[in-house]
Image: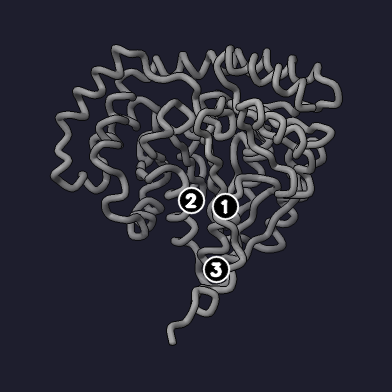
Amino acid sequence: MALTPQQLVRAEILALRAYPVADAAGMVKLDAMELPYRLPEALRQELAARLAQAEVNRYPEPTGKRLRQQLARRMAVPEGIELMLGNGSDDLIQIVTFALARPGAVMLIPEPTFVVYRINATLSGMTLASVPLRGDFSFDCDAFVAKLREVRPALVFLAYPNNPTGVLYAQSDVEAVIRAAEGLVVLDEAYHVYARKSFLPRLAEFPNLVVMRTVSKLGLAGIRLGYLAARPEWVAEFNKVRQVYNVSVLTQVAAEFALEHLEVLEEQAAAVCAERAQLRVQLAALPGVTVYPSEANFLLLRVPDAQRAFDGLCRQGVLVRNFHGTHPMLAQCLRITVGKPEENRILLNALREAL
């Protein structure tokens, strides 16, 4: 008699929930921190022609050499620092975690933060340690460094700025963590284009620092591309864990094209930053709503009844992310991606009714 999944699958996997992705068909989609703007029509046509020439009958160049060279130029990667590509930043998080998951190894994170760090600690068998953020979601550096010295983690993840809170930790606090850590510190700079702050130029200063980014928040979420910058000795080990053909031919071609027109994507991101400032003021004016500071392309807000507000928004065709029930510090919290001006107007009108 065949055994069931409950009998064969690891207990810690059975206890997990799959990462939630809501059905957004027909909705004003403000739940996943995507850039709301598509490429201009003329560029879409150029991209289509470029993709039509891609050799999809061949395996991709395994390390994405040409794309890595272009990224190094456009992102001003310091001399002596190497890049590795991933199928989105989730792929890179898994690669780094699996590479460092020796028996008994510890991962240290602040909480609440990006849930994928915790998931990968479970998948890899790493021990997870965490330090709560302050009540306003600022980083408690003293408590974090004290915990770091206590548990001596092999791996630290810091989202810079943080997800789902949007808070950008003080540069001096991040420096203190890097200097105090014996293990590897990964700065996840997924929202760097909105925060306009980065440790990438300083990689050569810190032998235990890795900077990770994604192009998803830059308007290219659909092509699934992340990149990691670190000293060569780290990249050499991570490449042993990376799936050989983890970044497709089409992704490489599309990313190379987009980087040729990086200024267009950056202009669109700047428009989102302007909308973010205006939207924050408008949301904060709603009764019973607290809006937290954000340096990303989303806003975290606390409302009187998150489930009621979420359900009311869904009924009106607006999809946001409900974090109530995911972590005690996120009770009654919704996360809202900054959309186009017309999408933000629809959101505000719908939220007034939903509250």
Q: Is residue 281 above or below residue 51?
A: above
Dividing the picture into quadrants, the one containing residue 66 is top left
The residue tagged with tag 1: helix, strand or loop?
Answer: helix
Residue 128 percent location from the top left of the image: 64, 61
Residue for point 81% across, 26% down: 289
In the picture, the quarter occupied by the C terminus is top right
Please tell me how crowded label 1 is: few (under 14), some (14-19), or many (20+) other residues with Cα within 10 Å: many
Q: Is residue 172 left or right of residue 185?
A: right
Residue 298 percent location from the top left of the image: 62, 28
The residue indicated by pointer 1 is 117
Inspect the image, locate mark 3, and give the three-letter code of the amino acid beneath it: Gly
Q: Earlier in the sequence, mark 3 or mark 2?
A: 2
Inspect the image, locate mark 1, and give the three-letter code of the amino acid beneath it: Tyr
Q: What numbered label is drawn on residue 125? A: 3
Dividing the picture into quadrants, the one containing residue 89 is top left
Please tell me how crowded label 2 is: few (under 14), some (14-19), or many (20+) other residues with Cα within 10 Å: many
Residue for point 49% across, 58% down: 97
Residue 111 percent location from the top left of the image: 70, 48
Q: Is residue 219 left or right of residue 165?
A: left
Q: Is residue 274 above or below residue 100?
A: above
Q: Is residue 285 above or below residue 110?
A: above
Give the Cα separation between the discs numbered 1 and 3.
12 Å
Inspect the image, locate mark 2, and give the three-letter code of the amino acid beneath it: Ile
In the picture, the quarter occupied by the N terminus is bottom left
Residue 295 visible within the image: no
Whether residues under marks 1 and 2 lie with C-beta atoms below 8 angstroms apart, the answer is yes
Q: What numbered label is drawn on residue 227? A: none
The residue indicated by pointer 2 is 93
Give the Cα separation between the discs numbered 3 and 2.
14 Å
Residue lying furthest bottom: 1
Residue 311 percent location from the top left of the image: 70, 35
